[in-house]
Image (cartoon, rainbow, N blue to C red):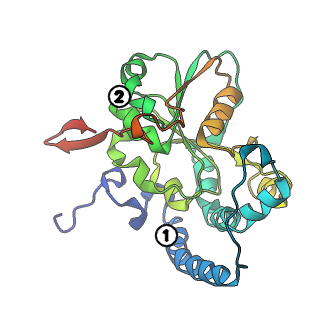
């Protein structure tokens, strides 16, 4: 790169290491802290692992398994909750900026918006390319499939960013999203880099976890501009269904939401773009 040349943020291959001009410097402290956070959390995990009691493996049948909310919450508190609490602090200035500057609104309820596709990462997605290319209704996918949807020439669709472990690489390359009118559907507890890198429209919601005061009491106080809350856990497909149903899409058709491991294939084969001399080509 020539000295003094300034690239647009959407042209950068590694945006979490560069300031996003639309935040006016409010993102630098957040992203620097998050990089330091990973080292501290890894040390904490090592200490916790050393303190865990020894146990033996046991084999049980599906019939013997019953849901246990309290035990599930304890497991959640030891992992994702800690990360989401930290993220919610450092995302605050960026989320405020998104609302103040008109890039974001609270995920809006709606009705009578017609049918929509719910996209999953199952191997059957590979056989649905023609269906998706010709689809005229709504479309909801997660970050895992968003680049592939762009490769199928889709526009005006919704991309769910809900998992606290999602990284910016799932959106790459960022130039794909120029003039595509896609929405990032996300919440204030995701990794700050994923909020910082998305230059386009956003729909925010607050996640709700049963019997956890951080989600039921703290987040509503910290983010009063976000009116919508959703129970999202289980898998991305269930969260996508919740978003689409809330927004008024009906009926919903699941595409690639299989978990059956057919043909020894566990996931779809993603489409990968390459731009050369201004021409974009796609491969699997």
Q: On the picture, is 163 further left or further right than 61?
A: left
Residue 36, can we see it? Answer: yes
Q: Is residue 143 above or below residue 139?
A: below
SS under mark 1 = helix
Q: Nearer the viewer, residue 18 or 70?
A: 70
Q: Nearer the viewer, residue 94 or 203?
A: 203
The residue that mark 2 highlights is 152
Total residue callouts? 2
Q: On the picture, is 280 further left or further right than 113?
A: left
State the quadrant of the N terminus. bottom left
Residue at image location 81% in from the left, 57% down from the top: 221
Q: Nearer the viewer, mark 2 or mark 1?
A: 2
Residue at image location 74% in from the left, 54% down from the top: 223
Q: On the picture, is 13 further left or further right than 163?
A: left
* Residue 36 in the image, given as x and y percentages of width and height: 52, 78
* Residue 266 in the image, given as x and y percentages of width and height: 45, 42
Q: Earlier in the sequence, mark 2 or mark 1?
A: 1
The residue that mark 1 highlights is 28
The disc label shown at residue 192, or none: none
Mark 1 neighbour class, 10 Å CA radius: few under 14, some 14 to 19, many 20 or more: some
* Residue 92 in the image, given as x and y percentages of width and height: 65, 61
SS under mark 2 = loop
Q: Quadrant of residue 89?
A: bottom right
Q: Is residue 220 above or below residue 139?
A: below
């Amino acid at each position: 790169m020539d000295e003094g040349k300034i690239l647009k943020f959407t042209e950068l291959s590694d945006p979490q290491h560069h300031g996003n001009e639309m935040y006016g410097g409010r993102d630098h402290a957040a992203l620097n802290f998050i990089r330091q956070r990973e080292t501290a959390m890894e040390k904490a995990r090592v200490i916790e692992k050393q303190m865990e009691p020894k146990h033996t493996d046991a084999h049980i049948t599906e019939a013997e398994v019953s849901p246990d909310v309290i035990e599930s919450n304890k497991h959640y508190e030891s992992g994702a909750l800690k990360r989401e609490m930290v993220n919610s602090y450092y995302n605050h200035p960026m989320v405020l900026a998104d609302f103040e500057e008109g890039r974001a609104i609270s995920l809006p309820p709606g009705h009578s918006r017609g049918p929509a596709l719910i996209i999953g990462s199952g191997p059957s997605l590979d056989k649905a390319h023609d269906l998706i290319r010709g689809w005229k209704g709504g479309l909801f996918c997660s970050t895992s499939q968003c680049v592939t949807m762009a490769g199928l020439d889709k526009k005006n669709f919704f991309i769910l960013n809900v998992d606290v472990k999602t990284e910016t690489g799932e959106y790459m390359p960022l130039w794909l999203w120029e003039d595509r009118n896609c929405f990032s559907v996300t919440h204030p507890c995701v990794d700050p880099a994923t909020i910082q890198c998305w230059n386009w429209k956003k729909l925010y919601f607050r996640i709700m976890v049963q019997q956890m005061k951080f989600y039921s009491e703290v987040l509503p106080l910290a983010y009063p501009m976000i009116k919508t809350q959703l129970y999202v856990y289980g898998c991305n497909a269930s969260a996508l269904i919740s978003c689409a149903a809330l927004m008024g899409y009906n009926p919903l058709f699941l595409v690639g939401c299989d978990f059956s491991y057919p043909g020894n294939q566990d996931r779809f084969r993603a489409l990968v773009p390459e731009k050369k001399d201004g021409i974009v080509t796609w491969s699997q």
